[in-house]
Every structure is written in structure tokens, then in C-alpha cells.
Amino acid sequence: MQIQLKDYPQLQFIAWNRQKDDFIEEEEAFSLYERHWRWVEQASLSANERQLIERLTQVFGHGVLNV
């Protein structure tokens, strides 16, 4: 399944080299969150984006977000 960057502001921020209207695969989004977690403003995460991160962590990280 693909994710549109503009729907998730922190993901869009850490995917700075892509257009905000771009779509990326869920596995790539998970990888971006893991690699760039230090740049994610956790206090600014919407409930929707938190749910996305939790779901991606369960599916691709087997319950673990390596940060």
C-alpha cells in the first residue's frame, strides 16, 4: 500500500527530497521513520500519524522501531 507524504507532516519533513504530493510504499516510510527519527518532532505528531507509525512498526518492525 502506498502513502501520500502530504497526509503525514513529519514523514513529509523527513522525506525532504521528495515532492509533498509523492506517494511512497509503506515499507519505505517505515525505513524513513527509523533512519530519521531524531528529526521527527514527536510532540507535533497527529493521532493519525502516530497510528500509522504504530501500524508500520507492527508490520515491518515486528513491534520494534529501531531508533
Image (spheres, rainbow, N blue to C red):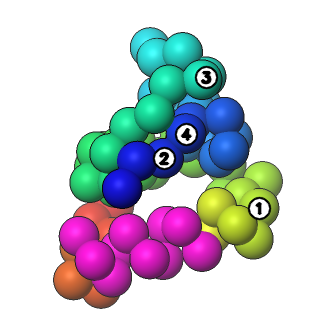
What residue is pinned by disc 2?
Answer: 3
Across and down, in percent, residue 2 comes to 40, 47
Nearest to viewer (mark 1 / mark 4): 4
Q: What kind of secondary structure does the magenta stretch mostly adopt? A: helix
At label 3, counting other C-alpha atoms closer than 10 Å, the crowd grade (few under 14, some 14-19, many 20 or more) is some
How crowded pointer 1 is (Cα within 10 Å; few <14, some 14-19, many 20+) is rated as few
Whichever of labels 3 and 4 marks the residue nearer the N terminus, that label is: 4
Q: Quadrant of the C terminus?
A: bottom left
Name the residue that disc number 4 marks: 4
Q: Nearer the viewer, residue 26 or 41?
A: 26
Q: Nearer the viewer, residue 44 or 49?
A: 49
- For the residues bearing labels 4 and 2, Cβ distance under 8 angstroms: yes
Residue placed under numbered mark 1 in the picture: 46
Give the mark nearer the N terminus: 1 vs 4. 4
First to last magenta residue range: 51-60
Q: Earlier in the sequence, mark 2 or mark 3?
A: 2
